[in-house]
Amino acid sequence: MKKIIIIIFIFFIALEVGYAQANSSVYNLYLEDELIEFETPLQIKNSKLYAPARQIAELLGAKVAWKQELSAMALFKDREEWLFFTRESLTYRNGREYSNEIKAELINNRSMLPVRFLGELFDMEVEYDGETSSTYLRSIDKLEQEIQSTNILGQSIATAEQMANYVLENNPNYNLSVSALELAQIFLEEGQAEGVRGDFAFAQSILETGFFNFRGDVSASQNNFCGLGATGGVPGNSFESVRIGVRAQIQHLKAYACYDELNNDLVDPRWLGSSDIRGSAPKLEFLAQALNPSGSGWAYPGYPSYKYENVEQAFADGQTYGQRIHKIFLKIIKSND
């Protein structure tokens, strides 16, 4: 399970191989093409390039503190707290174990972390030049970064018109009590109220209902657009209105994505409360049980097991539950191009 989580975030293994094979013992790190001068030189440990974490974090607007009693380094980024232990390979995110493969190194009394991990943590593009033993951290185009991001929390990118048009292109005879445009607008409004990506939730509904055909266990009259409570012949929950049904879905996504309180009154009958599952899926990928750090998830197992031997194969093909939602979203924003 832990290896699967790391696979999601560390895609460029070739970078580490390049570090291990580099002939030079002097390594350079550039931030936006400007060389960073370090008091403690960059070093290779276990085929990974390590750099002073505090200096890089502060350059990127984060804060770092040393936890003497734990022999661990704390890094504060946005609303997240990361804890990196130096005595063992162990990392915590917001108080929960995140990985047993990332370890902070104490070198010359400096807390060091892998450059690759730091770059990805701060949503930076990481490139390695083997000829000069130089690594480059560069900002990714903000819009493209937002488009490619799978964070469930955040502002929607797709417009109501794009969302509705995509449905009309694929199913002009959808089975809804409101227009596709009105439904899309409700998703955006309810998502904004809770800080959840309404366009992602809409894409999830397209996946769950088959473009709002409702040919599975759930009927259109239930106003249940994501299959809440529906399992193998059980129709699941019903809601008094379209908006309440959408609100329940948004609230359920928020419970998976974070520990924040709700802004609207609770209507989700399957609210996670203080469950261990709460906050276990900040990204769409983790909605798949087979990829979720808690071992649970929205969809079980979250990939077509009849087609793939394991989740790694499905992930490589982009066929896990969250990946399919994101693909629908990408089609939505490109539908009017």
Image (cartoon, rainbow, N blue to C red):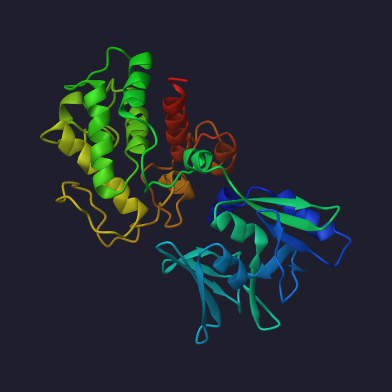
- Extreme right residue here? 23
Q: Is residue 276 above or below residue 14?
A: below
Q: Does the rendering let one see residue 70?
A: yes
Up-down relation of residue 41 to residue 67 (above or below): above
Q: Nearer the viewer, residue 100 or 16?
A: 16
Q: Which residue occupies the extreme front position in the image?
A: 34
* Residue 107 percent location from the top left of the image: 70, 79
Spot occupied by residue 179 in the image (x, y as percentages of width and height): 21, 20
| Apparent side of residue 144 relative to residue 104 in the rendered image (left or right) | left
Rendered view: 42 above or below 222: below
Residue shown at the point (74%, 49%) measured from the top left: 14
Tell me where residue 160 sits by quadrant: top left
Judge from the rendering whether residue 138 lies leftward or rightward of residue 311; answer left or right: right
What residue is at 61 percent from the left and 66 percent from the top?
Answer: 56
- Viewer-nearest residue: 82 or 96: 82
Seen at 45% across and 35% down, the residue is 326
Relative to 5, residue 249 above or below: above
Q: How many marks?
A: 0
Q: Residue at x 27, y 29 (%)?
A: 184
Residue 303: x and y in percent read 47, 37
In this view, the residue in front, 257 or 37, is: 37
User: Is residue 230 at least partly visible in the picture?
Assistant: no
